[in-house]
Amino acid sequence: VVSAAPVPSSNPFSGDAEAIEKGHQLYRQFCSACHGEKADGLSPRWGRYAADLRRFWRGYSEFLRIVAGGRPERGMPPWGGVLTEEEIAYVGAYLETLALPGARWTD
């Protein structure tokens, strides 16, 4: 699992090694096709396609809302019917380990 300096977060699973590992697995299964294996927005299939999640700046609650509800206007499907809120939080905990300076995971 990737390790990085902890970032301030509102995610209850932030820094939880088991949640981060689960989040990494879920990310690879559901997110990496569009957001890239490194969460940098570089899709292996479509090139620079989706948001660079290492720079996520909208806060944890907004992350939950966006993943659950999708962003259909931008081609992102809603994952709320596929992933539980807890699983989405795991993905967030994993993404926090990849955060670049300026990323914001607090509300």
Image (tube, grey):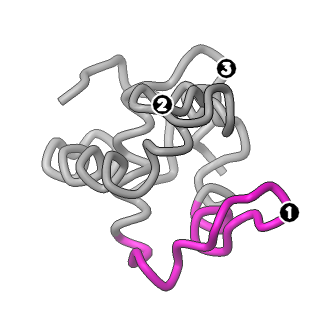
- Between 11 and 69, the one lying in front of the other is 69
Q: Which residue is mark 3?
A: 102
Kindly indicate the quadrant of the structure image that contains residue 100.
top right
Q: Is residue 5 above or below residue 46?
A: above
- Between 2 and 27, the one lying in front of the other is 27
Q: Residue furthest front?
A: 45
Q: Is residue 44 above or below residue 24?
A: above
Between marks 2 and 1 in the image, the one whose residue lies nearer the viewer = 2
The x, y position of residue 74, in whole percent, is 80, 55
Measured Cα–Cα span from mark 3 to mark 2: 25 Å
Q: Earlier in the sequence, mark 3 or mark 1?
A: 1
**In this rendering, would 58 be left or right of 29?**
right
The x, y position of residue 82, in whole percent, is 42, 79
Kindly indicate the quadrant of the structure image that contains residue 65.
bottom right
Q: Which residue is mark 1?
A: 73
- Look at the image and tell me in which quarter the N terminus lies: top left
Residue type highlighted by circle 1:
Glu
Q: Which residue is mark 2?
A: 44
Using a 10 Å C-alpha cutoff, classify the residue at mark 3 as few (fewer than 14 neighbours), some (14 to 19) or many (20 or more): few
Q: Residue at x 37, y 46 (%)?
A: 93
Residue type highlighted by circle 3:
Gly
Q: Which residues are magenta?
A: 64-86
**In this rendering, would 100 be left or right of 23?**
right
